[in-house]
Image (cartoon, rainbow, N blue to C red):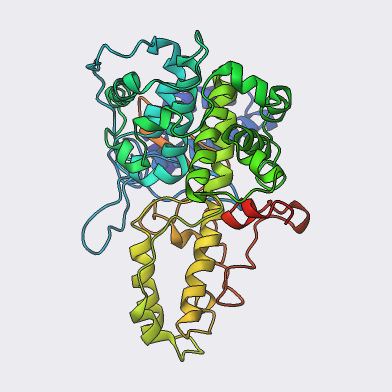
């Protein structure tokens, strides 16, 4: 049992040849013994594993720097993966543009504040940092619907509650609302957030003033609302049940109806004049209710609750914009078997959707069903998703150029790391077939089990007829 030439070369390459000689010398003391053979076999096996590992490290496909290309990870069924902007797609879009999956690090600086907002912002540092990360400069627009805007909305509610902690008010006075809102955006931008998030999320300073809600002070609020019931319902929001078996949502709506005076009109069966104004008042009173919750709950508890409520809302609609798929209609109307021209037209259309934004797995189901309904209305009856191998992940941005990233339907945050920059978690990355609708109508689609159906949202008709 000697260090034969091929093995000698391997061991010299990895620095283990001298160790082999040492063990061989020991082995000569027990020549022919089982111990010698066993020692040399173990040594040979270890050297083989070491060389194999070394070859892997030297493989040009191995990632050793955030600036190198990365291979798509091997994913098990439903196993989430971490996606970092350090991941550069291997297959760029045909027009040469790349999705923003590149290493990005925030440029921080001292914000220039107005000096006219009487708030100690350091007391809100945790939720501010979380919001800045979730709305980071390169990802705000792509993650706006699912992560950035829900977190920004939560921050504004928490800011309202904190601003009024030492007063009887639940909203900001108009005199300081603009300055405080400006300071919030300035601080977020100084921490790496996108300064355009007010436009991305359609928020403005009036969002923290209570608008047309007639009740804006604590004493009146507590006289009109069953605050114990409200706090019990929203102190611990179940992230798995709230969307289909809501507890906190109806409690907030009930309080908002009380504050807006709408509930009294409904109880008295009065016809409501200016229904649009009442709808606006209800919405703005819901903001006042959330301000009260922020005042009473710890910031992290309030933030968790608001993010769950936002997730329930965003996961009920498809945020993608669908242009009329005229070319798909032409190529696919009479197709019953696999057709290169039909599938090419469909893939071209879907590639445009893939450049819009990242969506959740539940949103992808709705988007796929909605697009299928559009195709059916245009005369395409064949299941094109099955025919052309379209998966749920095809409706979201392609993280690796060929592998779609669907975000989790539960609330998530962007994470910042000093090595890789910003990252977020993808879920449902497997090849789950997109659902083809059974009809051109979306009315039958429900993501809750029958016994978990959400109550209908109030409309002008239901406000007129409380018994229905």
Residue 329 picture location, percent across and down: 40, 83
Q: Nearer the viewer, residue 69 or 116?
A: 116
Q: Nearer the viewer, residue 38 or 348?
A: 348
Residue 15 visible in image = no
Residue 371 visible in image = yes
Q: Determine the residue located farthest toward the right in the rendered image.
A: 451
Residue 353 picture location, percent across and down: 37, 62
Image position of 185 with respect to 431: above or below: above
Q: Which residue is depicted at the point 64% across and 68% down?
A: 444
Q: In which quarter of the view is residue 447 placed?
A: bottom right
Q: Which residue is depicted at the point 29% across and 24% down?
A: 182
Is 95 on the left or on the right of 202, as rendered?
A: left
Q: Which residue is depicted at the point 52% across and 74% down?
A: 373
Image position of 28 with respect to 121: above or below: below
Q: In which quarter of the view is residue 222 placed?
A: top right
**Quadrant (top left, top right, bottom left, bottom right) of the C terminus:** bottom right
Q: How many marks?
A: 0
Is 452 on the left or on the right of 407, as rendered?
A: right
Residue 448 picture location, percent across and down: 69, 55
């Amino acid at each position: 049992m000697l260090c034969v030439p091929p093995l000698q070369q391997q061991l010299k390459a990895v620095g283990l040849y001298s160790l082999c000689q040492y063990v061989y010398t020991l082995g000569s003391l027990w020549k022919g013994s089982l111990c010698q053979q066993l020692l040399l076999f173990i040594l040979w096996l270890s050297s083989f594993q070491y060389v194999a590992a070394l070859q892997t490290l030297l493989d040009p496909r191995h990632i050793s720097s955030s600036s190198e290309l990365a291979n798509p990870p091997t994913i098990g069924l439903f196993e989430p993966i971490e996606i970092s902007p350090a991941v550069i797609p291997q297959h760029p879009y045909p027009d040469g543009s790349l999705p923003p999956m590149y290493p990005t690090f925030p440029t921080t600086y001292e914000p220039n504040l107005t000096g006219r907002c009487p708030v100690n912002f350091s007391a809100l540092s945790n939720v501010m940092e979380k919001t800045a990360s979730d709305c980071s400069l390169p990802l705000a627009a792509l993650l706006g619907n699912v992560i950035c805007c829900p977190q920004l909305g939560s921050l504004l509610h928490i800011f309202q509650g904190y601003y009024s902690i030492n007063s009887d008010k639940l909203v900001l006075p108009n005199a300081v609302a603009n300055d405080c809102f400006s300071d919030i955006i300035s601080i977020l931008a100084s921490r790496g957030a996108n300064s355009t998030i007010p436009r991305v999320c359609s928020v403005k300073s009036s969002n923290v003033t209570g608008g047309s809600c007639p009740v804006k002070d604590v004493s009146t609020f507590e006289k009109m609302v069953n605050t114990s019931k409200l706090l019990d319902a929203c102190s611990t929001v179940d992230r798995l049940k709230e969307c289909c078996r809501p507890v906190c949502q109806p409690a907030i709506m009930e309080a908002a109806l009380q504050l807006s005076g709408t509930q009294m009109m409904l109880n008295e069966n009065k016809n409501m004049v200016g229904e649009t104004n009442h709808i606006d008042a209800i919405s703005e009173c819901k903001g006042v209710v959330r301000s009260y919750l922020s005042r009473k709950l710890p910031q992290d508890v309030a933030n968790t609750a608001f993010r769950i409520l936002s997730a329930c809302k965003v996961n009920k609609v498809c945020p993608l914009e669908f242009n009329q798929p005229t070319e798909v209609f032409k190529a696919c109307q009479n197709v019953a078997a696999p057709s290169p021209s039909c599938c090419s037209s469909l893939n071209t259309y879907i590639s445009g959707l893939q450049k819009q934004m990242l969506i959740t797995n539940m949103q992808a189901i709705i988007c796929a069903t909605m697009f299928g309904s559009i195709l059916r209305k245009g005369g395409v009856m064949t299941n094109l998703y099955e025919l052309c191998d379209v998966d749920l992940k095809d409706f979201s941005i392609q993280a690796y150029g060929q592998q779609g990233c669907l975000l989790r339907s539960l609330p998530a945050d962007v994470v910042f790391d000093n090595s890789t920059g910003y990252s977020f978690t993808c879920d449902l990355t497997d090849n789950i077939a997109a659902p083809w609708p059974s009809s051109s109508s979306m009315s039958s689609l429900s993501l809750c089990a029958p016994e978990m159906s959400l109550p209908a949202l109030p409309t002008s008709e239901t406000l007129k007829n409380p018994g229905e």
